[in-house]
Amino acid sequence: MSPLFYPEKDSWDWDPSSREISNIDQWKLDFNEVQEFVVSPDGQKVAAVVQNEDETFTPCINGETWENSFEKAWSLKFSPDGRLFCLGMNDDEWTIIEDDRPWEDSFEYVWNLKFSQNGKGAGANIRTSDGYGVLLNGEVWENKFVQMRSVELSPDGVSAAGNIQIEALSEGDVAKFRQGLWNIAVDGKPWDSNFLNVWDCSFSSDGGIVAAEVRLVSGRQTIAVDGKAWKNDYRAVWKPIFIPGSRDVVAPGLTTEGWKLLLNGEPLWNKSYNQIWRQTIGPDGRKLAAVVSPEFGQWTIAIDGISWAKTFGDVVLDPVFSSDGKRTAAGVKESGKWTVAVDGTPWPEKFGMVWDPVFSPDGKHVLAKAWRDDSYMLVVDGKITGPAYENLFDFVFSDDGTKLLIKCVENGLCFRKVIFSKDLT
Amino acid sequence: MGLPAIPIVSDLGLDETAKALNTEQIATVVNRILDQETAARFKVYLNTCVHCGLCSDACHWFLSNDRDPRFSPVGKVKQTLWEIIRKKGHVSPEFMKDCSRIAHTECNVCRRCSMYCPFGIDIAYLLLVVRRICHELGMVPQFLQDTVNSHSVTMNQMWVKQDEWIDTLQWQEEEAKGEIKTSRIPLDKEGADVFYSVIAPEPKILAQLIGNIAQIMAVAKVDWTMPSLDGWDNSNMAMYSGDFEIMGRVERAHYESALKLKSRRIVMGECGHAFRGAAYDGPKWLGWREPPIPLIHAVDFYHELLTTGRIKIAKKFETPVTVQEPCNIVRGRGLGQKLREIISMVCEDFRLPEPGLEHNYCCGAGGGTINCGPPWKTSRVKGNRVKAEQLAATKAHIIITPCHNCHSGIEDIISGYKLGMHVKFFSEILMEVMEVPDELKC
């Protein structure tokens, strides 16, 4: 539940307490419309886009609205370092607004607001009269393109990449499409090669290399790294990831023997599966886990090629490692019910929905947010802990693991609670 | 007396591809597909067929083309697959052009013939194998291939750009608010009960349908969301062109989007083929036995809203109506009774089509056939005279079609046979008769 690094975490208030942040039910009386709530990483602020009396929209934070208001506003998000962003439009011009300050440039459209892993970079896709591009940390790419359908930020937030269309295509022009009109642009510069299709891409940990899933011709897909396709191709591939600190790329590929996990285009595990995806690198940068389907309709987690003994009939979500890399957990679904499986063993308690589990820093406990019977709950090692919440946001451990920050809504009130981890079990 | 000549239709996707192919290339592809991608089911179907021809009377193409045996289901298999197998794949490019014409444009893979086959052979599956071979050879009608190209790039079937999609939702939210003040289209809301997905013609040319659903959701007080990024289109023409790799990618995008938002179920708009792709073909290719999130067709959803009283009817629709029962949700899913129940709940004068329910005739547009585009429209409309006769016999004024392909296909039938009828989605009728509490009115 806390996939992003929170750079300011040490400076948060970690004194055990339960504090009301805002009476959000009151907002519903104060404004024409209150949209979805978001909570700052440190839990000190709760915010939502609201509609004013004059029918404009603006974010409201702890009951106070911004000075700026907009004809339209959406995509309200806190960055990992606690800044509040949204996308706003006035007079048919859109821009990014950061803590009530609109960025300098405005555009025909802005969407897909994203933050870098370290929380410092913020970027989005933009459309201008000159074409499509990226707005990153207030700077607009010089080059514009016929179309752009994604943006990925480097972990340090200083670079951006996304898939671009390099030439216009009339609808129905199947011959021109076959020539390959798609590419990746990194910081506005396209790779040397175009492809039939380009889908998701990833940055290396140092932000210096980009890998993407590409289609060479119909029925032949592979991974391209900085524009160069792997020498082998496959019937299909899924999104690649880099091994941290290296140029090595791992991606699933569909071979004649089934789906395999590939390292730089060569089989990594000596096994094939009915399906394999959601590959995840462990905290040591070496251990590798993935969701695999050893046979049709059966799903589990494999770690370095060794599968959990237990399989699940419906779904297995992303594997999550403990900080020492020795344990793994994942949200799983069987017979229509969700739960969490830890090291292959599912919790007996079942839910209507679960969120990705979180390990305590010492790896001894597993926590997850769950939903059942119209309430949210915190589940610790399979046991429901604490009250039923109207809403429960992400929870964060202190670095030393002794405390847990819970952000929740009870009886229309948004709370910030810091508790001792030892009291969880 | 010989059979009439099949009119020659010029199609860039077939004509240009044929020029670039040779028999050896075809044989290589055919044998790879038959060896590696078909299994016991294929062999059982081929070996079980006793060539009795009882499937013929099931097919609207056969019935509408004066019982021409070339349009019978078994006739289509005979002209394509049997010949391909007999020659071990060594067939000519011109022969493969005919295969594409037959499999892509003269069969709606509606599966009505399976009910008439004494052995229940899934004849449509055999024609899908022919389509798969055609796809692997690049032998796909131009406009169908263009639709698949769009899927491959945008994950939607009509080249809708990401900004256009979001902009359309925001516009339709405004429109809906002008009617019902609590209307919203919540984007990317996490943990909603309903993830609502549509097919691309809605944002592209029928945006008011999205505004309608925003109003219906507001009146029914449904906790719902739509995604701002790819995965919002539940349709899948790659399933029908034979491009299973793109089919899988599109279906994965749809489900991943809902999984990411932690939605508890997906409700999809009124489309039949999209239901098939999302409920069956897509998940199976990806390895899911069932959809990873429950998938509810609009007919099922409206049945829930009406029978639980979340939507009440102010005054029933009075104009006489009948229904086009979409193959993929009626024959394929058994939603026929629910469909009839919801129509009866909102319409005063509902005239049943005959034959009906799972025996209903296909609209003639499904199975990717209408996506083959203008070159094939004349033969498509000619190939469904029985549908025109069936609809005319009801003497209804409105035909309710809870499927986009049916909607367009029936419009062509109405126009081609001058029926003087009109087509509406169920949601359009519901919008006219739904009770809106005073406090929600603008």
Image (cartoon, rainbow, N blue to C red):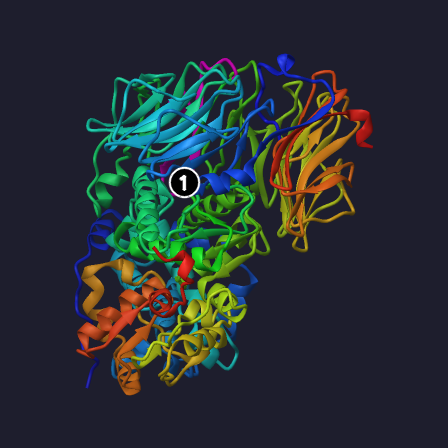
Give the vertical position of A131 relative to A11 (above or below): below
Residue occupying the point 31% across, 29% down: A164
Q: Dot 1: what SS?
A: loop
Residue occupying the point 61% across, 36% down: A413
Point out the image quarter for the C terminus of chain B.
bottom left
Give the vertical position of B325 relative to A144 (above or below): below
Point out the image quarter for the N terminus of chain B.
bottom left
Magenta: main secondary structure: strand
> What span is colored magenta in the figure?
A205-230
Q: Nearer the viewer, residue B62 or A117?
A: A117
Which image quarter: residue B430? bottom left
Q: Nearer the viewer, residue A261 or B384?
A: B384
Which image quarter: residue A252? top right
- Count the labels in the image: 1
Q: Position of residue B314 (x, y in %)?
A: 40, 72
Query: Can residue A345 be seen here?
Result: yes
Is B306 situated left or right of B370 in this image? right
Is B227 situated left or right of A12 in this image? left
Q: Which residue is mark 1?
A: B228
Q: Position of residue A184 (x, y in %)?
A: 35, 26
Q: Position of residue A120 (x, y in %)?
A: 48, 15
Is A242 situated left or right of A97 in this image? right
Residue occupying the point 26% across, 59% down: B372
The kind of residue on which mark 1 rests is: Ser
> Does residue A208 show up magenta in the picture?
yes
Chain where mark 1 sits: B
Query: Can residue B5 be seen here?
Result: no
